Amino acid sequence: MASPLHARQGWHGWDSYAPFYDWENARTVGRRDVPFWVDLARRVGGPVLELGCGTGRVSVPVAKVADRFVGVDRSAPMLARLQTRLRRARVRSCVAVVRADIRALPFRRRVRFQLVMAPYGILQSLLGDADLSATLESAARVIGRGGMVAIDLVPDLPQWQECERRVSLRGKATGGRQLTLIESVRQDRRRRLTIFDQEFIERRGRQRRVHRFSLAFRTLTMTQVTQRLERAGLRVDAVLGGYREQEWHPEAEVWVILARRR
């Protein structure tokens, strides 16, 4: 089912994941991180850029409070769902959605953002050091004077137990569908990768469809990220242990890093 790891890139699987992303996340992370990003956008002020905006779970609430909002993602199916979400939320003015590679942001020199945000561990979909460095350097280039880069990381990926075809979720979805998620977890310790082989079984009446794809995430250390932020010309202002701005510690469920342009 999964492509060989040496041939994989971090964006593999996300197009296939698009129809199921919101359904799964409503049952896992929900909206627990959204107030943090909304409050941060308010405090920083000015234009906001979101890296890996996906279907807009975070984008739409932030766009409602930002002076100007731009979301960037590589996945066309994800962005199509974001556009629908924006229309339904009636968020129209000062919002742009761009299909692009976050390692090489396609903005002219005069375009500047006061906040570049990378929520929900999106930088962990970058599976190599060069990709991470390129993304942070690209983000640093579009930050305005005194602007901020904000990142969150999921540190517990290595603790996920390997398993084969475990039923993770079941439930109703839109259009009268029933979804079942069957998940396998693999660890590549040498490359610090956690691979989730996903199988979504979709039932509607007597119809049954199976969707299979894999998602890979890389474990990053705090030192790795802070050093690369500094190399990109950014100064780390704060390291937090959660969305309520708790004190950081290595066992925190979520790590949040805030850095400013020097």
Image (cartoon, rainbow, N blue to C red):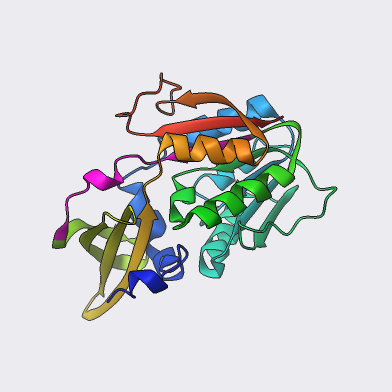
**What residue appears at the point 40 percent right and 35 percent down from the top-left corner?**
32
**What residue appears at the point 27 percent right and 68 percent down from the top-left corner?**
200
Horizontal arrangement in the rendering, residue 131 relative to residue 162 (left or right): right
Horizontal arrangement in the rendering, residue 116 relative to residue 205 (left or right): right
Residue 47, percent across and down?
73, 39
Report the quarter where the N terminus lies.
bottom left
**What residue appears at the point 40 percent right and 23 percent down from the top-left corner?**
248
Answer whether residue 58 is visible to the viewer in this image: yes
Residue furthest top as drawn: 247
Residue furthest right as drawn: 110
Q: Nearer the viewer, residue 88 or 79?
A: 79
* Quadrant of the image occupied by residue 234: top right
Answer whether residue 178 is visible to the viewer in this image: no
Horizontal arrangement in the rendering, residue 260 relative to residue 56 (left or right): right
Q: Is residue 59 magenta?
A: no
Report the quarter where the C terminus lies.
top right
Residue 20, percent across and down?
37, 62
Q: Is residue 162 magenta?
A: yes
Horizontal arrangement in the rendering, residue 230 relative to residue 23 (left or right): right
Residue 174, percent across and down?
37, 62
How many numbered markers are drawn?
A: 0
The magenta span reads: 149-163
Q: Nearer the viewer, residue 185 or 34?
A: 185
Up the image or down, 246 lies above or below 21; here it is: above
Residue 231, percent across and down?
62, 40
